[in-house]
Amino acid sequence: MKISHISVTLFILLFFNSCIGIKDLKYLQPSEDLQLNEYGLIPVVYENYRIKKDDILAMTLITTDQNAAKFLASENTTRFKGGITGNDNSLRMTGLIVDPNGYISIYGLGEFYVYGLTLREVTELVQNKLNEVLYNEGKAEVRMNLGAIRYYMIGEIGAPGEKLEQSNRVDLLQAIAKSGDLTRFADRRHIRIIREYPEGKKNIVLDVTREDIMNSPYFYLQSGDQIIIDPLKEKISGLGGGTTIGDVTQFLSVGIQAITTYLFFKTL
């Protein structure tokens, strides 16, 4: 009987050690490392985006000059617009695509090498050329933005795949929400982001169970990011599925019956 009690105790300890705890599932848990500004708010910190190949840029030109307006009246009005809606195909029809060599082509202005530049630098580049064409600085103002942010969700997520967000900024939690949330087996403490730079790729690890993740410059996604959500070790080992009271009761009942049956036949 003593052996039976020891076996049952060891079995229960092993089972509960393999269960997924609430701390492994809860987002943005309090952290002493969270940094606030002088207003008691979390400051917005993000990396300055640098243009990549195959990016889609949106160009808006504001002017009251009739000659500048005529300049936009032909092909350019169908190639870039201020408001872009629709899917990837419509974006490619109305946006400026960065080609494999890092160039964009703007009708009437020529080609511009933009790979690795910031949006501000691209804006200045196009603005200077436009001033030359119009022979008068100040006749028109150029505004360059990303047509969309493209990212990829992989692993323990409700709806994995390629995502296209028609916005200039999206954070990691928004991306998770738009992808159907993480599964209960997702390792929330070790979410990887593969980010491309002109110099190469970087592997970034974030923990969404800590609220100080919002202080990270990597909290906001960039176009081309690959978000990889690995499974917890409990799923890999085949344990950890008993997260409900019914699962726990059934699992323990079957286990105790198996141990009791084994000990009964062993004593015969």
Image (tube, helix red, strand yellow):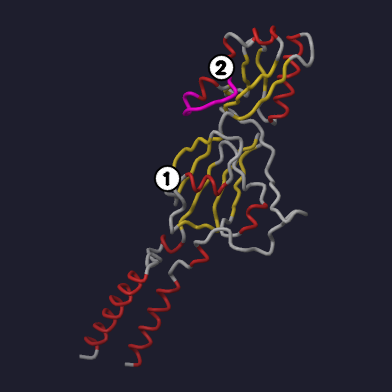
Residue at the disc numbered 1: 159
Q: Is residue 169 left or right of residue 236?
A: right
Residue 82 is a magenta residue: yes
Q: Residue 29 location, x and y as percent?
A: 59, 62
* Residue 141 picture quarter: top right
User: Where residue 51 is drawn, which disc sits there?
Assistant: none
Q: CA distance from mark 2 to mark 1?
A: 32 Å
Q: Residue at x 73, y 21 (%)?
A: 125
Q: Residue at x 54, y 15 (%)?
A: 78
The secondary structure type at the circle numbered 1 is loop
Q: Residue at x 61, y 22 (%)?
A: 101
Span colored in magenta: 80-90
* Residue 265 picture quarter: bottom left
Residue at the disc numbered 2: 79
Q: Residue 260 location, x and y as percent?
A: 27, 84
Q: Is residue 58 left or right of residue 159?
A: right
Question: Above or below — where is 81 with respect to 245?
Answer: above
* Residue 159 picture quarter: top left
Residue 206 is a magenta residue: no
Mark 2 crowd level (few <14, some 14–19, many ≥20, 10 Å Cα): some
The three-letter code of the residue at mark 1 reads: Ala
Along the line of sight, the residue nearer the viewer: 20 or 90:
90
Along the line of sight, the residue nearer the viewer: 127 or 18:
127
Q: Magenta-highlighted stretch: main secondary structure? A: loop
